[in-house]
Amino acid sequence: MRLSRYFLPTLKETPAEAQIVSHRLMLRAGLVRQHAAGIYTWLPLGFAVLKRIEQIVREEQNRAGAQELLMPTIQSADLWRESGRYDDYGKEMLRITDRHERDLLYGPTAEEVITDVFRSNVRSYKDLPKILYHIQWKFRDEVRPRFGIMRGREFLMKDAYSFDLDTAAARRSYNQMFVSYLRTFDRLGLKAIPLRADTGPIGGDLSHEFIVLADTGESEVHCHRSLLEMSVPEGVDYEGDLQPVVDAWTGLYAAADEMHDAAQEATLGDALVTARGIEVGHIFHFGTKYSAPMGAAVAGPDGEPVTVVMGSYGIGVSRLVGAIIEASHDDNGIIWPESVAPFHVGLVNLKVSDAATSAACESLYEGLGRERVLYDDRDERAGAKFADMDLIGLPWQLIVGPKGVAKGMVELKNRATGEREDISTESALARLA
Ligand code: ATP
Ligand code: MG
Ligand code: MG
Ligand code: MG
């Protein structure tokens, strides 16, 4: 992409309304613009990151055996009356009436919709287990939308739902999602800690929030220090027994605020970490909470109907953009992990009026692949170009000027470490391939 043509409205000034660094940088780097309170337009650069995150989430869901579908954003209120949640949900739910005076709502989550799809289409225990998910926009009329997309009203969520014949099988589905969350956040360059979370009236230990440590986070973290050092399993066999992996991660003390236990914490001494963090995911086993009132049952092995056992598994896809920036930035701007970077390389032409420099840039632009490169071909001061490149945080910068070009050399800069190296154009092509 040529920067001269790209829609990238960066800001030099820090927007006054933004209280946390990720929000400031998302506005300054031209990733999003607010449309109304908690409702955003994703500009091309931000949208590119969002799509890359979404794709990693998708790949790890699929790998764990979940199947993607797409449910609507607008849902029927009647389904929520069946589950009993229509009145309970309160003001966070955006309620809509259509021209025929029918009650609709903008989905804040999709347990009712998926349970309805399941009950109308699945008949036998032989069709179980099933994990179904979608990546869809949600709306919650948050009292205090803030921190940009971090607590939006409209936000993108991946939500998966598991259906099993009994609790033991549901535990296996839960474990598959648990491990896939470890893998997903790791690929996103994040250290996300699973905390024991409240399961409400159902009880049990089957709910975990995945939290990324950040001082600006709105969640409280209580955990054993060793959890910060744990390494995420690679090459997982999702059909095998995942319980040992889950046990390793849940064996150490780690609790969300409402689950924390002062007496247990007192025994941990220096090993206790209390910190703040951002909730990026939440998994939940809820048994027959929806399947029982909504009549989602299958014929069991003996022909008798069995009410299915369910769980749900959310990831805040749009919130992750902010969480990644909170975890990865410096005074000059964003530092994207390679896995989510909107472009791999920023190519900086220091003198567009110089034919040899521009020719070298064009051949690098082609050679590296136009869709992987953001080519700054604007007629701007070098200082402004460097500042913009650092702000938008692409992993690599390739700086090309007349002096170097005369010797066949370019400068390669690593955004994360700041290291610079003079290398030949050929080795630049090889290194960034
Ligand atoms: P929070 O505690 O931050 O309000 P939640 O517990 O209400 O989140 P869940 O119902 O568990 O959220 O939804 C699953 C995931 O969706 C959350 O872990 C979070 O990453 C994301 N999410 C929830 N609310 C928002 C929001 N208002 N804006 C952006 N992402 C959100
Ligand atoms: Mg909430
Ligand atoms: Mg929460
Ligand atoms: Mg939650």
Image (cartoon, helix red, strand yellow):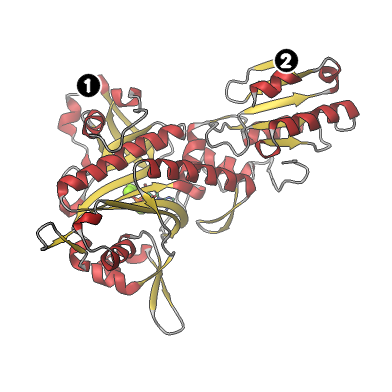
Residue at coordinates 64% horizontally, 48% vertically from top-left? 44
Kindly state the secondary structure of the residue where label 1 is placed: helix
Using a 10 Å C-alpha cutoff, classify the residue at mark 2 as few (fewer than 14 neighbours), some (14 to 19) or many (20 or more): some
Kindly state the secondary structure of the residue where label 2 is placed: strand
x and y percent of residue 140 in the render? 41, 60
Figure quadrant of residue 232:
top left
x and y percent of residue 231 in the render? 35, 24
Which residue in the protein does label 2 denote? Answer: 422
User: Can residue 241 be seen from the camera position used here?
Assistant: yes
x and y percent of residue 54 in the render? 48, 46
Front residue of this view, candidates 108 and 364: 364
User: Label 1 amino acid?
Assistant: Gly
Front residue of this view, candidates 87 and 367: 367
User: Can residue 197 be seen from the camera position used here?
Assistant: no
Which residue in the protein does label 1 denote? Answer: 269
Q: Quick check: 410 above or below 13?
A: above
Residue at coordinates 32% horizontally, 65% vertically from top-left? 117
Q: CA distance from mark 1 to mark 2?
A: 50 Å
Figure quadrant of residue 227:
top left
- In the rendered structure, the answer to whether residue 386 lies left or right of residue 161 reads right
